[in-house]
Image: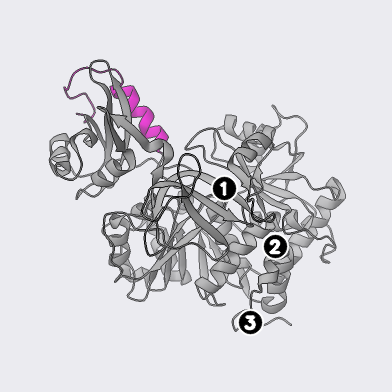
Amino acid sequence: MATLSGKLNTFLQEEVSGSIVTRFRKVVMEHGQKVAIKTRHGSITYTALDELSNRLAHYMLLHMGAAKEPVALMYKHSERPIVAQLAALKALKIYCYIDEKLEQSQQQFIVSDLTARYLFCDSACEAAARSLTQANPSLTVINTDTLALYESAAPVIACSEPDDAAQIVYTSGTTGTSTGVVLPHRNILSLAKSHYFDFDLGPNDSFSNLCPLWAVSSSSEIYGALLTGCSLFPFSLNDEGIASFHQWINDQNISIITAAPALFRMLFSEGADTTLFNSVRLVKLGGDRVTTIEFDIFKQCFGALCRLRIAYGSSEFMQATQNIINKGYTFTGNVLPVGPQMDDCDVFIVDDERNEVPAGTEGEIAIRSCSLSLGYWRQPQLTNERFVQDPHAKDRRIYYTRDIGYCDSNGIFHYVGRKDSRVKVYGKMVWLTQVENAIAMIPGVKAAVVTTIDNQYRGTEIAACVISNDSSINAQSVRAAMMGVLPMEAIPAKFDFTDQMPLLLNNKLDKRKVKRRLLALFENMADEANTAGGTG
């Protein structure tokens, strides 16, 4: 029987070994008349969301059949994409979002690699969706805004297994070519269950939905809300703007906000009216290192009882560690620890031969779990390289992340950086992430990106792009601030200064774009003279 109040009865461990649709139906039964999704244009209850997705699922089954196959989705932030993704799951399909802001070549690559026969979209994205049929003539585009849905809203009699694929997430390509990561029902259910208990979620909680729909962080927002009886509030920063966002938090009583650290710095910079954030009780940051900059912003902007949650995760394993802290949290250094391992996985550190190393020793982070991604879409060789069967348990696999970190004596994990961010400069090893962190800690600096350049006389050197709108920040002041903090070989030889913070579509800092700019400016330069555009 549906209810309007009270916490959802429970989230049983055996439900993780079920399907997203089964769990969603349980929420509908208990909270049918509660608002599931609310946008500026209206709201939709859990019952209405269930019925709309049932109708679209019947349409999918009628036209596509019951075979498990990928289906592409292209939507603006609203309730419509949620209807479509739930319908896809009910029809035994594997959904994959394609961002309409991607370059068309990237969109075409995803459609081609996905081998989807159908792409469902809204009216706002229809033109972009139909343009993809020129290179993919077999692709059928369906605008669900104008579609005559199946008349019956009866539940679809179909059932997925926990290890069936639910979603394909194409990575942003920050570390290479975009690759489709296949997420099973079990992964998403496990994360939602963790949110339910770790965040003590109740029916009065409201999740922001800022993350791009294609990103795994958006799945965390969507299912963290809709599989736990909370409400989801989609918001488009591109369409509405930051100033509107602050007022929106207050107007909608948003209690849980998710953001990448770079976006968080932009959203809650100096001058924000902190009285608008009184409803927020949890800030979730992930996708990159969280530094004292973000922690200071958190302490300045949010109430005394608000908590900050830092996690280590990726598309391949969604979440492996978690650190939920308050304003009184203390730590050493300028990067916050990512916390202890989650209950459903075993995190450990290995050397280059994949042998486990003792506490305090840096190495590659590895994750052992039964809730990992199924692997990479249509790339069995890469899947076998990165996901290895656990020799001690046939239901578990080990994922080698290519991230470097260490576990301290208290079982707390610390993320250091990507494996490829360790370079040799003037014959000595340097962590580029440590250089970025040191520059970012300088007062007046918003962020920093560093890379290596080839100097024709001195060999490998470091170049840094410093993002700041403080005119007093220059090469001399940055070098002076870094003296004594880092060894000489880690202090950049070249600097570029800008007040623009370029972001990827997933709201992370676009480091590849900045690095390309640095290489274009400084590669093979022999002199120390300043160049145009604030470099030095």
Residue 452 colored magenta?
A: no
Does 309 sit above or below residue 466? below
Disc 1 target residue: 399
* Quadrant of the snapshot with the C terminus: top left
* Rendered image quadrant of residue 411: bottom left
What is the magenta range? 511-536
Density class for disc 1 (Cα within 10 Å; few <14, some 14-19, many ≥20) is many
Q: Residue at x 77, y 56 (%)?
A: 56
Label drawn at residue 20? 2
Asked if residue 447 can be seen in this view, the reply is: no
Q: Residue at x 44, y 55 (%)?
A: 286
Q: Residue 107: image x %, image y %?
A: 61, 35
Tell me the amino acid under the disc marked 1: Tyr
Q: Are marks 2 and 1 in contact (CB under 8 Å)?
A: no
Disc 3 target residue: 4
Q: Residue 482: image x %, image y %?
A: 17, 42
Tell me the amino acid under the disc marked 2: Ile
Q: CA distance from mark 3 to mark 1?
A: 42 Å
Q: Residue 390: image x %, image y %?
A: 63, 51
526 left or right, relative to 252: left
